[in-house]
């Protein structure tokens, strides 16, 4: 049998701004679904779910700038975390019909993948398939590293999280609450403020488009100062936070989405770093690859929370491979709530 498989390729690097159809193109190719085209120790997958994450922007710029991630190759498919179904296999232990996670899945409908890259999903785990890309995927792991490992949260501490209604922020706030902290988030709309307080359990949240004096807002919401700030935006918000940190505060730098689409000479600086000296503050950037030795520990803790409904997910789902560019652009507009992902086909297993 032969099928058409659509995939998104990077045709031109993005020097600044959000990628457009000038940079990303949807290409269609024919693929034979037969064992003959699958190499040994590989499988063929029909992809069901694809993760859409801000870090992908850093892999489209042609320079290892800031995040120092390897760049996508021109005229090749962009890749992300995905979930797919095995439809042909030349690897013992991976059978047709099994569902697997692929950490380098092309943004495509079908692919052939080395079996060594794949991790099987237990269909009887009591966890939904999309949760493996959110609570148990990159966003959940980033939140856990930031809050639990680097944040070293203690009961009663004051935690501030920016981009709090995004993929990472939703889980970071819940983890901090489970550790006994008071949690406040900043978001870009009143709808997201309501969502954080009523559905996710944040103690407080504010709309940075309304409360535009960040220094005043943080004074209002943190009368006793900030012990932990999980930074997802950088820029002006990070600068304001440094005026309100307590002694020995921790600032895990998870991401800086407000700066991704700018060349470095246009990025906003932070003028008050001297506060870190007097308050003996620890600010530390982190990349998840450096913490993979803790991934098993993370999974054990997080799966327990998910099964007990102590951690809940919020997904913004786009439909069809054609929606990749739209879904990716949405990450930079504050239009989404929760983890953005693509349901590649209508019968994707959830």
Image (tube, grey):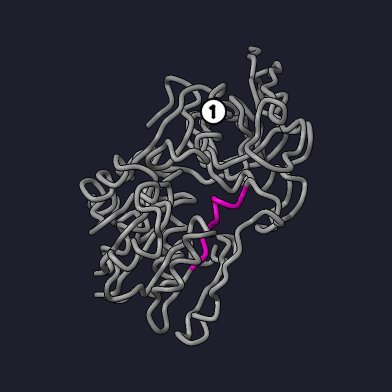
Name the residue located 41 percent from the left edge and 47 percent from the top edge: 166
Name the residue located 29 percent from the left edge and 74 percent from the top edge: 157
Left-right relation of 5 to 343: right
Name the residue located 40 percent from the left edge and 60 percent from the top edge: 214
Left-right relation of 197 to 134: left
Q: Is residue 271 above or below residue 133?
A: below
Name the residue located 29 percent from the left edge and 47 percent from the top edge: 193
Q: In this view, does 34 lie above or below 269?
A: above
Q: Name the residue under label 1.
A: 326
User: Circle 1 — which element?
Assistant: helix
| Residue 138 coordinates in the image, percent (x, y) | 49, 51
Magenta-drawn segment? 252-260
Q: In this view, does 165 lie above or below 272?
A: above
Q: Quadrant of residue 90?
A: top right
| Residue 89 coordinates in the image, percent (x, y) | 61, 32
| Residue 226 coordinates in the image, percent (x, y) | 35, 72
| Magenta-span inclusion, residue 254 | yes
| Residue 101 coordinates in the image, percent (x, y) | 52, 42
Q: Is residue 339 above or below residue 308?
A: above
Left-right relation of 215 to 222: right
């Amino acid at each position: 049998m032969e099928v058409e498989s659509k995939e998104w390729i990077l045709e031109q690097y993005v020097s600044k701004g959000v990628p457009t159809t000038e940079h990303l193109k949807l290409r269609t190719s024919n693929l034979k679904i037969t064992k003959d085209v699958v190499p040994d120790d590989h499988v063929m997958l029909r992809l069901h779910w694809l993760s859409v994450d801000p870090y992908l922007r850093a892999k489209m710029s042609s320079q290892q700038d800031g995040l120092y991630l390897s760049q996508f190759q021109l005229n090749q498919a962009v890749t992300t975390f995905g979930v797919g179904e095995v439809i042909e296999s030349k690897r013992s232990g991976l059978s047709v019909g099994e569902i697997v996670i692929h950490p380098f899945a092309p943004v495509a409908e079908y692919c052939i993948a080395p079996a060594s890259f794949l991790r099987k999903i237990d269909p009887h785990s009591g966890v939904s398939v999309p949760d493996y890309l959110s609570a148990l995927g990159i966003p959940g792991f980033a939140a856990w590293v930031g809050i639990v490992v680097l944040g070293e949260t203690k009961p009663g501490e004051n935690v501030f999280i920016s981009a709090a209604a995004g993929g990472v922020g939703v889980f970071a706030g819940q983890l901090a609450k489970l550790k006994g902290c008071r949690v406040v988030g900043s978001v870009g709309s009143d709808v997201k403020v309501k969502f954080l307080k009523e559905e996710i359990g944040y103690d407080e949240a504010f709309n940075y488009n309304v409360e535009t004096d960040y220094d005043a807002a943080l004074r209002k919401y943190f009368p006793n100062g900030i012990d932990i700030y999980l930074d997802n935006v950088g820029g002006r918000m990070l600068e304001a936070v440094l005026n309100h940190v307590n002694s020995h505060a921790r600032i895990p730098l998870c991401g800086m989405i407000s700066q991704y689409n700018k060349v470095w000479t246009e990025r906003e600086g932070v003028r008050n770093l001297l506060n870190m000296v007097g308050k003996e503050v620890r600010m530390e950037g982190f990349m998840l690859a450096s913490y993979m030795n803790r991934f098993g520990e993370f999974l054990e803790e997080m799966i327990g929370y998910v099964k007990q409904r102590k951690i809940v997910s919020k997904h913004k789902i786009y439909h069809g491979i054609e929606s990749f560019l739209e879904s990716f652009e949405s990450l930079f507009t504050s239009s989404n709530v929760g983890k953005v992902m693509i349901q590649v086909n209508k019968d994707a297993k959830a």
